[in-house]
Image (tube, rainbow, N blue to C red):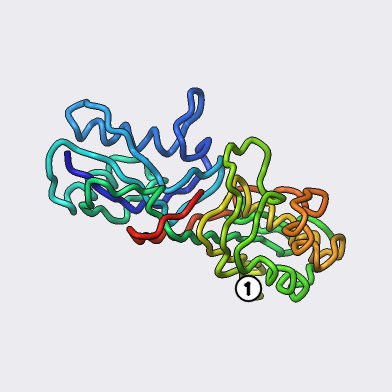
Amino acid sequence: MVRYKAVIAYDGTNYSGFQTQENGHTVQAELEQTLKKLNSSQRVLIHASGRTDAGVHAWGQVIHFDLPQERELEKLRHALDTQTPADIAVRSVEKVADDFHARYDAVEKTYHYRLDISRPRVPFKRYYAAFYPYTGVLDVELMRRSMADLVGTHDFTAFCAAGSSVENRVRTIVEAGLTLDEDNQELLFVFRGTGFLYKMVRILVGTLMKVGQGRLPVDTIEKALETGDKKFVGPTAHPEGLYLMEVKYDKNNRAEG
């Protein structure tokens, strides 16, 4: 068997998430169906760097899969790219070591979150940026001050949604930034770290929006990290603003989540 690593992008609008589900249309199912066609109708199981939820997008999702023979890389990439639906793109394919794992060998992930703050709302963004529906202007500087408390190694239990089976909730955030795009009337949140818990980025954004509104104190993230108490966090932000942008690998250092 030959192991391949692929970087894929997808528009998550019409999918029930990445991971195969019994009664849902998923990105994984589409990719595996295409690989099955390319593998003489034999099933090919793919493994991803992590799940994304319904409506969440990706530019740099990473998968690995095994085929029984070596393929010319560009031909394989082109076949996958052209035979998957138009809302999935296969950006690159490379041959990797037999023990490479898209999830367990990841050492860093970067997520972006786009928030539309335009008035009135722009209908063309409705699937690709979450809309901020409330009156009043968000205080960007307050949110930046609050985000600064994220950098470092912390227990993110307060920012993990119910339903997660992960026991170790300690993660390291190396970058947490916020940019205001005045021309397009958008806020761009950037989170880069060793790993992220279930719905963690969306809960962070929902909390930061409450801080920007003045409805939560600027030290709310600090308190949530110290106590693990969910009473300090805000709601889970909508999925359409979230993008998995990049996954990095280093064989000698593995991430969790």
**Residue in the image at 69% along x and 58% along y:** 205
Q: Is residue 247 left or right of residue 126?
A: left
Eyeballing the image, is 118 above or below 18? below
Give the residue furthest to the top.
22
Q: Position of residue 155 (x, y in %)?
A: 65, 55
Q: Is residue 53 left or right of residue 100?
A: right
Q: Position of residue 152 (x, y in %)?
A: 61, 68
Q: Position of residue 32 (x, y in %)?
A: 32, 34
The residue where tag 1 is placed is: 179
Eyeballing the image, is 186 above or below 235? below
* Crowd around label 1: few <14 · some 14–19 · many ≥20 (10 Å): few
Q: Is residue 112 left or right of residue 78?
A: right
Q: Is residue 237 visible?
A: no
Find numbered disc 1 in the image and state the secondary structure of the residue it sits on.
strand
Q: Is residue 56 left or right of residue 232?
A: left
**Residue in the image at 25% along x and 31% along y:** 36
**Residue in the image at 62% along x and 69% along y:** 151
Which sits in the foreground, 154 or 144?
154
Q: Is residue 154 visible?
A: yes
Q: Quadrant of residue 226 in the image?
A: bottom right
Q: Position of residue 171 (x, y in %)?
A: 57, 57
Q: Quadrant of residue 162 in the image?
A: top right
**Residue in the image at 64% along x and 60% along y:** 154
Q: Which quadrant, please, contains the N terminus?
A: top left
The residue type indicated by label 1 comes to Thr
Which sits in the foreground, 7 or 194?
194
Eyeballing the image, is 61 above or below 118? above
Q: Quadrant of residue 242 in the image?
A: bottom right
Total numbered labels placed on residues in the image = 1
